Structures are given as C-alpha cells and as structure tokens.
Amino acid sequence: MHDLPTGAPLVVGVSGRSGARAQEPEFPVRWAAQEALLRGVPLWLAHAYLGGSNRTGPAQKAVRGLERTAAWLATDHPELEVAMFARCGTAVAVLGDLALDAGLTVVGHGRHTQGRVAEAVLGSVTAGLAHTASSPVVAVPAHASYTAVDAPLVVGVNDLGGPSSVTMDFAFSEAQARRVPLRFVHCLPSHAPMDLARTVERQDAEMRAAVTPYQEAYPSVPASVEVVDGDPGEVLVKESVTAGMVVLGPGRGWTAGWRLSRLGPVGHEVLNQAACPVVLLRDVAEAGRA
C-alpha cells in the first residue's frame, strides 16, 4: 500500500477573488486550508500572473492578493504553516511546477459568480493540470455547500475489473483520515445489452475481491460496492450531493472517467456539476512519462 508523501505540502491556486464575506478568501482556498490542517502539512498559496517583472503591476497585485489571503488564514488558522508563491506564467504551468513537490493540488472549478468566462478559465486550468500535474488534483466548487461531517467518500469505478491500485490507495487513506465510509459506485446503463450486464455482474465479484485486501489493511474504514443503473455522469453528480468527495481514478473503462490525454465526457460532466470536491488521479507511471 502506498500513501501520499508524508509532510508534502498542499498547493492551492488563489485567484484573488473574495468569498461570501468581505476579506474572506474564496471557498476553494478555505477548503484547502482545512485539508492541510487535516493532513498536518503546510499550505502553499499560488497565484499565476502574465506579463511584466517582479516590480511591475501584475506581480505586485499578485503579491498583495496572496498577502491578504495569508493574513486571513493566520487569523482564522494560526496553527497552519503558510507559504506564498507569486509567479509569472500560466496557471497550469505555475501550479504544475509546484505540484512536483506537493501531496495534493487544489483548484477552483464549476459554476462561478464571475460568469461563463471565469468558469471556462477554471475548467481549462483543471483539465490542464489533470494532464500534467504529478500530484492528485482536487477540483473544488467555487461555492460552499452543506456536507455532513460523516459524508462518505465516493469512488467512480471506470474499469470493469475494478479500481486501480492508485485509486484504492488514495481512497482508503483519505477515508481513514476523515473517519468516513467509502463507497465504490459502478454504473450499468439501463440500455446495456444483456451480455454486457452479465459481464458486469461477473466483474462485480472481482471488484469486491479487489477491495477486500484494502479493507483488511484499513479495518477502520467501512467500504461498500454498488452497481447502479443510469448514466455514469448523472449518477456521480447525484452522488456528489451527499458525498464529502468524489474520486475519479485512471482507467480505460466505458463507465467513466478521464484519460491521460484528456478529460472524458463523464469527467467534464462531474467536474462542472458536482456539489462536492472532485479528485482526479493519474497513474504514477503515466504521469512520469507526460
């Protein structure tokens, strides 16, 4: 079993926009701060800007924005270690570079008060990082939604043979840290031919067998496997309403997710509509070749 790097910092992209209350950082930053505290690791605030040098307007504005965010965090979370990085370049390049030393990279995503342009920018950053970042990427909705403290962690299974070891390691480790149940959700479309349905039924047994060793390694984590009817994207979006986190792992299956070279249609649907944070995982070997 492999856990995330011990003590590796958590990186979060800071856009400079405010939260619901004046001077309050945007929700993805606040979520990242809570996650860093949960892991007991430093939080790296990152802002990417284009044009100019360290002494010009864009750079100075970036630094001031990071300083405001850091000041708020120092007041609200005095025990949290915070570092700031204002760098010239695209958000994908800057965050991707910092992700080399990170255990997790967090970005905002989904519907945004700044309109469709802001949503498109956030979406392109998430998709770019999903392809290039060496750490897991978490896309956090731009706005907070109520989630029970014991909300389950939901894993979208995108291979008939079951989740990858990368997905298993991350999911069980996260569920244990949060002390929440873990649910593996596999979608079987209602229009699937009977032979495919029988194949999925057989593979479901294999998936349960794949989960068993991890349940033994993480005895405190309740884990369940579910096969449900419906479109994968719609099912996972619905699951996100009551989930604390949705995980999409690497794989080639039809159910769902995203591939190394691009986010698939299900990945896009879940990212754009999910009510909770969505984690994108990559195969370690493939990430090294990107």
Image (spheres, rainbow, N blue to C red):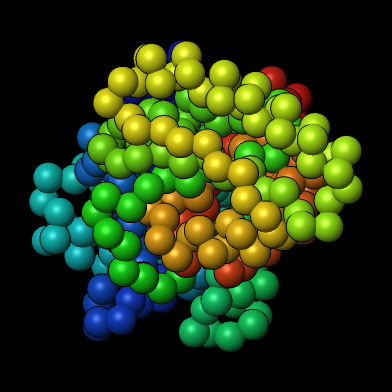
In the image: residue 272, left or right of residue 12: right
Q: Which residue is depicted at the point 51% across and 23% down? A: 211
- Residue 174, horizontal then vertical, whole percent: 37, 35
Residue toward you, 269 or 80: 269
103 lies above or below 193 = above
Residue 164: % across, % down: 63, 26
Q: Position of residue 162 (x, y in %)?
A: 65, 28
Residue 120 visible in the snapshot: yes
Q: Residue at x 65, y 31 (%)?
A: 204
* Quadrant housing the C terminus: top right
Q: Decide if residue 3 is on the left or right side of residue 114.
A: left
Query: 183 left or right of 49?
Result: left
Q: Is residue 198 above or below residue 211?
A: below
| Residue sitting nearer the eye, 132 or 279 | 279
Give the number of marks. Answer: 0
| Residue found 30% across the figure and 41% down from its top | 180
In the picture provided, is 184 more to the left or to the right than 64?
right
Residue at left 84%, top 51%? 192
Camera-side residue: 265 or 141?
265
Q: Position of residue 98 (x, y in %)?
A: 50, 40
Q: Quadrant of residue 270?
A: bottom right
Look at the image and tell me whether residue 49 can be seen: no
Q: Quadrant of residue 121?
A: bottom right
